[in-house]
Image (cartoon, coloured by chain):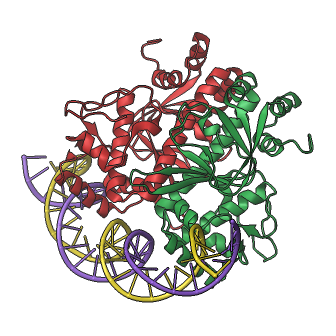
Chain colours: A green, B red, C yellow, D purple
Amino acid sequence: MISQNHPLDRFLWELTFHRPLDDDDRKAVLDLPLRIRRMDPGAYLVREGGVPANCAVLIDGYAFRQKVTGEGARQIIALCIPGDAVDLQNMFLNIADHGVQMLTSGTVADLKRSDLQDLVLARPAIGAAIIKSTLVESSIMREWVVNVGRRDARERIAHVLCEFAVRLESRGLSTGGFELPMTQEQLADTTGLTPVHVNRVLKGLEADGLITRQRRQIQFPDWRALQDAGDFSRQYLHLPSEDILHDGHGSAAAP
Amino acid sequence: MISQNHPLDRFLWELTFHRPLDDDDRKAVLDLPLRIRRMDPGAYLVREGGVPANCAVLIDGYAFRQKVTGEGARQIIALCIPGDAVDLQNMFLNIADHGVQMLTSGTVADLKRSDLQDLVLARPAIGAAIIKSTLVESSIMREWVVNVGRRDARERIAHVLCEFAVRLESRGLSTGGFELPMTQEQLADTTGLTPVHVNRVLKGLEADGLITRQRRQIQFPDWRALQDAGDFSRQYLHLPSEDILHDGHGSAAAP
DNA sequence: CGAGCCGTTGATAGTCATCAAAATGAGTGG
DNA sequence: CCACTCATTTTGATGACTATCAACGGCTCG
């Protein structure tokens, strides 16, 4: 609405969504110097242990946060979608405690770390918006701890699917059907399972009519049932309004 | 150092530790109106789904963050130690996405949510310190996702023990030996295991000489080996200096 | 059309959960 | 001070869920 096609539009929208910003604030964000980069799948946005010099905002495509254990097992910790500032997590910390990698191809805008820091100090409203958006990220991570710690394989996977769908929807990114842009191995790494077990669970969900798939396109014929299977409630996403997702199955919405 | 026995001293120290604050900033924090409350074990500081009106700072004693699944399983998401602001997570969000309960008896200082919000807006340096401290909390949560997602029972438990010990030490709270103020059931809920399995693993660690215990007092006779068993590296805690913990066993420190 | 990644399937093994019950220790009241 | 109660810890036996190992099929791409 402000400027039609600025690369940071979605990011800014996400911020204002967390806290009202006045025109000066908005302008300050949009005037940040930036560099656009095109990324291939698997490319690193941040390396674990590295010293990030800039903060990448995801314009297009998907990415994920990741850590590797001493034994070499990988755990995916978060999924990043367009509009996410990938590096708020590292902005004030001097050494990256986790890595971020592209899931698909896409484009990112690099902001200078110091520019962003200055912005936060100069404009408290932006600082507050950034705090809030990192707090929502924290909330999602808490849910992931629960997901991996206390739910079985089927619930975990259904939960991840629901979360991804709702987050996309909330940013106006869902194209009707959902594409899950990950391999089963990556899905295994986000749920703390093995690829083969993910495969079996996915087939189970399909057999039960909770999902349909063709390649990596996934549809949710019974959204309500999928939510139940995943013990999913969108409360922890702290979304503003209750957009109806995938309506049309007489799903009586529960608060 | 500033004022000898202000209840918020430890909290303030924690903040300055993340970012230098000038005297006005410090004074602003210490002048916050507050109410001291004594808490019993199990008492709620925040209820999941509730609307927090104030932000509690833990003065004394321990607490934990927690969520409950639809099936009634509990997952502990974080441990809070004296000096932690229990509610920064909820300060800018209008509905608590998780509960916080006292682990032991202790005392908390309640700050008014709006006071804290005003403070952040009025004093960007404090805002930055708060951001940083929530980012460290996020980092710890990321490690917990990894812990629960990709480590086996023995590693998980050893890791939690190490983390707790190092965090206490870093705030000058360790009394030489460590007391782990949780029941095995609570430890099970933090590691995503069952109480009986926790018991067995604990006995295993003891049999292997990695810990000794009498009631809930736990000692680490071989700190180095315990770290290895837990795949623990303090990097993710973002502590400033490399204090030596439990030295005296010729443990050649690795970076 | 071969190479290679990804997905699929089967067989087997392990880790951890579940169920049940006894042992220990702390707190309480007579 | 001792019996009593209750939470917590401990132990054993069994079973479920998920990992592991191995091999094959399908799709995409140069």
Q: Is residue B23 above or below residue A29?
A: above
Q: Relative to residue A229, is residue A169 drawn left or right? A: right
Observer able to see residue A238: yes
Q: Residue at x 30, y 50 (%)?
A: B229
Q: Nearer the viewer, residue A192 or A47?
A: A47
Q: Position of residue A132 (x, y in %)?
A: 68, 39
Residue A241 found in image quarter: bottom right
Q: Quadrant of the N terminus of chain B?
A: top left
Q: Is residue B129 above or below residue A63?
A: above
Q: Is residue A193 above or below residue A121?
A: below
Q: Relative to residue B246, is residue B147 drawn left or right? A: right
Q: Relative to residue B136, is residue A1 drawn left or right? A: right
Q: Nearer the viewer, residue A29 or A36?
A: A36
Q: Position of residue A131 (x, y in %)?
A: 66, 36
Q: Position of residue A119 (x, y in %)?
A: 74, 26
Q: Quadrant of the C terminus of chain B?
A: top left
Q: Residue at x 42, y 59 (%)?
A: B192
Observer able to see residue B48: no
Q: Residue at x 37, y 40 (%)?
A: B164
Q: Nearer the viewer, residue A167 or B67?
A: A167
Q: Position of residue B71 (x, y in %)?
A: 51, 68
How many numbered marks does the figure carry?
A: 0
